Image (tube, rainbow, N blue to C red):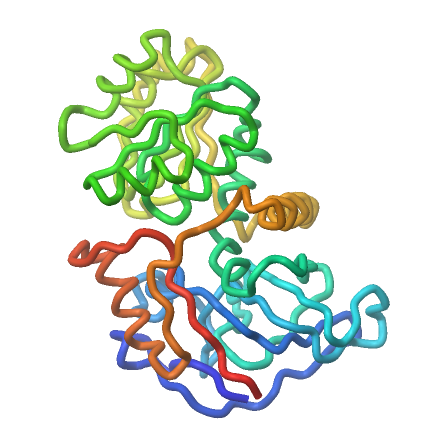
Amino acid sequence: MLAAYFEKTGPPDVLQVGHLPDPTVADDDVLIAGRYAAVNPIDCYLRSGSVPANLPRPYVPGSDLAGVVVAVGPKVHDLAVGDRVWTTLQGFAGRQGTMCQRFACPRSEVYRLPECVEFRTAAAVGLVGMTAFIGLVEKARLATNERLVIRGGSGAVGLAAIQIAKILGAQVVASAGSPEKALACRQAGADHVIDYHAAPWFETIREIFPDGVDVVWDATRSPDLVGACQILRFCGRVVLMAGREAQAILPVGPFYTKEQQILGLMAPLASPESKDRGAIALSRWMERESLRLPIAAEFPLDQIAAAHRLQESATIEGSATIVGKIVVCLPDG
């Protein structure tokens, strides 16, 4: 099969496209012929070596995949050849990723794709949609009419979180740093969009909601717990999903006297039950067209290095602007 892979960490040019052996199919596995995969920031971190990991070599990056079943193991009885499916949260913990023509994974991690949903839509939603679902529904328990602030609302996870929060009936304030990104947040359904360059974000939030908010979702690499504690109501929650090297200041007094919570979010570590609930909800919302991620760019597999360069320049270097997801069209074969 054709696959994108690297033998050593480094810049995007370490990525190669070539033939690797087809994966073996275990008793409870499903073999998928990939149609679309997606590029995520974690792919760049692993490829560059900035996030150390014990990876197989060669290593195929990628978390998301949508395609068609081409084989199933003897213990799989509820999926058949030809079924449309999607999967996400792959390529972690020493496992190979999805940027390839053929991908095998356990049946428990394969989800049916409604007929009306395009493959590239499912690939774009996968990781970011599952992250947003687990953070908002399973972790923060966001409820109808609660108030949610999303720092980093125009990122792919932020855009998914805006849409899911609105589906849940919450009020949403998103922060963005440019008119283009602000527009994306509004199109995703945010009730209010603030320019974080204009004033301290928490001061602007206080003008919108003088009596505070219920949840702060911080998708930035510099979480602001001081600001969050100033606007969170009693039993307010902070969801953290970024900022590996950050050393945030926590105002302990306001935090514990209002019984607030900080919730760390690492979607691949979620329970199988949480992932199943997320997959059911995401498939339903994609089918109803209430959850969509804009496609910022599409590349063929043989341009995977260019796809990584674009992702890296946007989310790591800050030298490019993308709104939405980068997807990769996988060749037939």
Asked whether, in this view, residue 310 is left or right of residue 95, the answer is left
Which residue is outermost to the front? 116
Asked whether, in this view, residue 257 is left or right of residue 192, the answer is right
Looking at the image, residue 33 lies above or below residue 227: below
Q: Residue 148 location, x and y as percent?
A: 42, 25
Looking at the image, residue 150 lies above or below residue 51: above
Asked whether, in this view, residue 291 is left or right of residue 50, the answer is right
Q: Residue 204 location, x and y as percent?
A: 23, 19
Q: Residue 268 location, x and y as percent?
A: 54, 53
Q: Residue 179 location, x and y as percent?
A: 20, 40
Q: Quadrant of residue 322?
A: bottom left
Q: Quadrant of the C terminus?
A: bottom right
What count of labels does the image hold? 0
Residue situated in front as seen by the camera: 69 or 96: 69
Residue situated in front as seen by the camera: 46 or 296: 296
Q: Quadrant of the N terminus?
A: bottom right
Looking at the image, residue 94 lies above or below residue 268: below
Residue situated in front as seen by the camera: 96 or 146: 146
Could you tell me which residue is drawn at 29 percent across and 29 percent down? Answer: 193
Could you tell me which residue is drawn at 26 percent across and 66 percent down? Answer: 310
Could you tell me which residue is drawn at 48 percent across and 49 percent down? Answer: 292
Looking at the image, residue 288 lies above or below residue 149: below
Q: Quadrant of residue 211?
A: top left
Could you tell me which residue is drawn at 43 percent across and 71 percent down? Answer: 328
Q: Quadrant of residue 173?
A: top left
Residue situated in front as seen by the camera: 237 or 122: 122
